[in-house]
């Protein structure tokens, strides 16, 4: 064993952080929008400033390179009222990222011969069955969102609420706050996202193993991966509560009880952080190469990462960016998150916020791409050319506009137009040679048509009606 002096051992963490200090600073100061304005300096923003702009209390980031977590860091507040800062140890709700780890747990049972990917799920279900017979539903269908089942996601429960059992959730019976999980169309026809289908796998895991779902996942998945700070238990264990981030809505207001509780653990119940999630990503990458098998072997990992029906939806993950990355996003009440892991080369990232606002996650993703040379995968901006807006046309745009629950206010300042959405932060409207506007913060283009604002992202258009 190589010997190190005590002084060197004490300073190893410092050397590690110093080695990547320049990259960290660049990530912190290279946040940008989705569009590049060719005749203006590139927009580059500071992460702390953008937290304020988006009214996001805190963000935590992890960057993976060459099969290692290169760095992890938190910014802002885990609880802004108590002035508790985000640290790499702060735990966030992973929301639908829970489905990725759940798939690992379910496929471990397949690997052990306790489940079959292609068997009818009724083979394993004892206390609940789908309410209508629309064909054989398999575990592969459930994990790939091709089972044809209902219920996209779950709103969670406030502290103090009576929590339903998994059977009550699937039946849509009180105290469950969502409808019955039932077939909408035949399985294997198409992909339709279903948190309800994932919750069926939770019941299957409990039935087959005979132990509570959170205990099974802790013992057989999280702990072997080294994700010892993470857990599925709902409500959270008392000894973990000091590490939990508080949930905030898009206006920066705290949710009652500080966060919601999710008995739908497999679909939305994981509490974790980028440091722990990076261990899952790296293990997936190494297992795919046949270099590790802490939970799943190489063959089962390949199965998990193989799209099942379409070209993107695999088992608990999505294969994206030209089949080069596995990925999942997450969104619970007051939490948003994303991870990406490359299928080759051992690169990736994890970004989590304690807010309903996803915008800063996109901005940080672009910043990481710019810093590490991953632009082809994560930053291919649309290019426009700015044009001067005639001063005498300012007044025709100014005013109030509405579409459903979204209220826009367009105001002029120093000869430029700014738009504010639902009392948020004013956003500069960049006038282009196409005769429309772009916002750096929001993807799409805005144009005045018959006195109304029409917004389009290249697909469908939305018309914001001018208000008196």
Image (cartoon, rainbow, N blue to C red):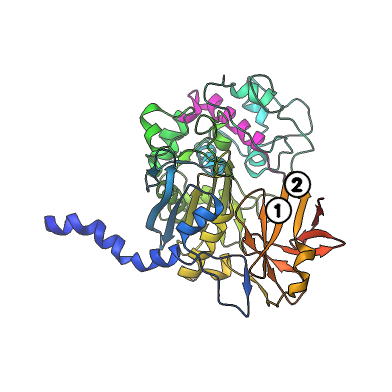
333 on left or right of 222: right
User: Residue 161, how many percent across, how many down?
Assistant: 56, 21
Does the magenta-highlighted stretch encompass residue 236?
Answer: no
Q: Residue at x 79, y 59 (%)?
A: 453
Of the numbered discs in the image, which one, if any, rests on residue 190? 2
User: In this figure, which residue is indicated by the disc labeled 1?
Assistant: 310
Quadrant assignment, res 3: bottom left
Label 1: few (<14), some or many (≥20) within 10 Å? few
Left or right, 98 with respect to 274, comes to right
Contact flag, marks 2 and 1 (Cβ < 8 Å): yes
Residue at screen point 42% across, 52% down: 75
What percent of the width, then of the height, locates residue 251?
A: 58, 44
Residue 304, given in percent of the width and then of the height, sits at 56, 48
Q: Position of residue 72 (x, y in %)?
A: 39, 54
Query: Who is closer to the viewer here, 96 or 307?
Result: 96
Quadrant holding the N terminus? bottom left
Image: 25 above or below 110: below
- Dividing the picture into quadrants, the one containing residue 53 is bottom right
- Depicted 96 relative to depicted 240: above or below: below
* First of labels 2, 1 by sequence position: 2
Under circle 1, the secondary element is loop
Q: Residue at horizontal 63%, vertical 60%?
A: 427
The outermost residue toward the right is 450
- Magenta span main SS: helix
Measure how far apart labels 2 and 1 are at the Cα level.
8 Å
Report the span colored magenta: 189-214
Q: Quick check: can you spot residue 288?
A: no
**Which class describes the residues within 10 Å of circle 2: few (<14), some (14-19), or many (20+)?**
some
């Amino acid at each position: 064993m190589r010997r190190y002096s005590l002084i060197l051992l004490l300073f190893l963490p410092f050397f590690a952080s110093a080695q990547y200090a320049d990259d960290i600073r660049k990530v912190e100061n290279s946040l940008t929008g989705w569009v590049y304005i060719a005749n203006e300096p590139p927009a580059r923003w500071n992460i702390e400033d953008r937290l304020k702009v988006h009214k996001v209390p805190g963000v935590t980031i992890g960057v993976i390179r060459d099969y290692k977590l290169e760095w992890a860091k938190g910014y802002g507040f885990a609880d802004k009222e108590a002035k508790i800062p985000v640290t790499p140890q702060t735990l966030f709700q992973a929301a639908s990222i829970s489905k990725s780890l759940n798939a690992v747990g379910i496929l471990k049972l397949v690997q052990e011969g306790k489940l079959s990917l292609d068997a009818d799920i009724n083979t394993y279900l004892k206390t609940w069955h789908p309410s209508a017979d629309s064909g054989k539903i398999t575990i592969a269908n459930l994990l790939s969102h091709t089972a044809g089942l209902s219920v996209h996601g779950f709103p969670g429960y406030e502290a103090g609420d009576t929590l339903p059992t998994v059977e009550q959730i699937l039946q849509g019976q009180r105290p469950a706050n969502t409808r019955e999980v039932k077939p909408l169309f035949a399985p294997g026809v198409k992909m339709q996202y279903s948190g309800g289908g994932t919750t069926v796998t939770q019941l299957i895991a409990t039935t087959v193993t005979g132990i509570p779902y959170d205990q099974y996942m802790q013992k057989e998945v999280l702990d072997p991966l080294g994700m010892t700070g993470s857990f599925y238990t709902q409500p959270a264990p008392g000894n973990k509560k000091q590490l939990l981030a508080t949930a905030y809505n898009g206006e920066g207001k705290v949710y009652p009880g500080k966060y919601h509780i999710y008995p739908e653990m497999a679909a939305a119940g994981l509490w974790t952080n980028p440091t722990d999630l990076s261990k899952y990503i790296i293990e997936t990458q190494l297992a795919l190469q046949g270099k590790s098998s802490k939970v799943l072997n190489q063959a089962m990992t390949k199965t998990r990462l193989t799209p099942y029906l379409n070209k993107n939806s695999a088992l608990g993950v999505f294969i994206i960016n030209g089949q080069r990355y596995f990925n999942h996003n997450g969104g619970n009440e007051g939490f948003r998150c994303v991870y990406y892991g490359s299928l080759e080369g051992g690169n990736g990232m994890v970004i989590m916020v304690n807010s309903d606002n996803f915008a800063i996650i996109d901005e940080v993703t672009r910043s990481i791409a710019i810093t590490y040379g991953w632009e082809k995968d994560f930053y291919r901006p649309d290019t426009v050319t700015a044009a001067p807006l005639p001063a005498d046309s300012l007044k025709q745009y100014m005013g109030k506009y509405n579409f459903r629950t979204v209220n826009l206010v367009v105001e002029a300042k120093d000869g430029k137009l700014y738009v504010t959405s639902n009392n948020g932060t004013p956003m500069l409207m960049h006038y282009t040679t196409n005769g429309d506007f772009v916002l750096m913060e929001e993807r799409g283009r805005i144009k005045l048509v018959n006195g109304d604002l029409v917004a389009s992202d290249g697909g469908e258009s939305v018309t914001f009606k001018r208000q008196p």
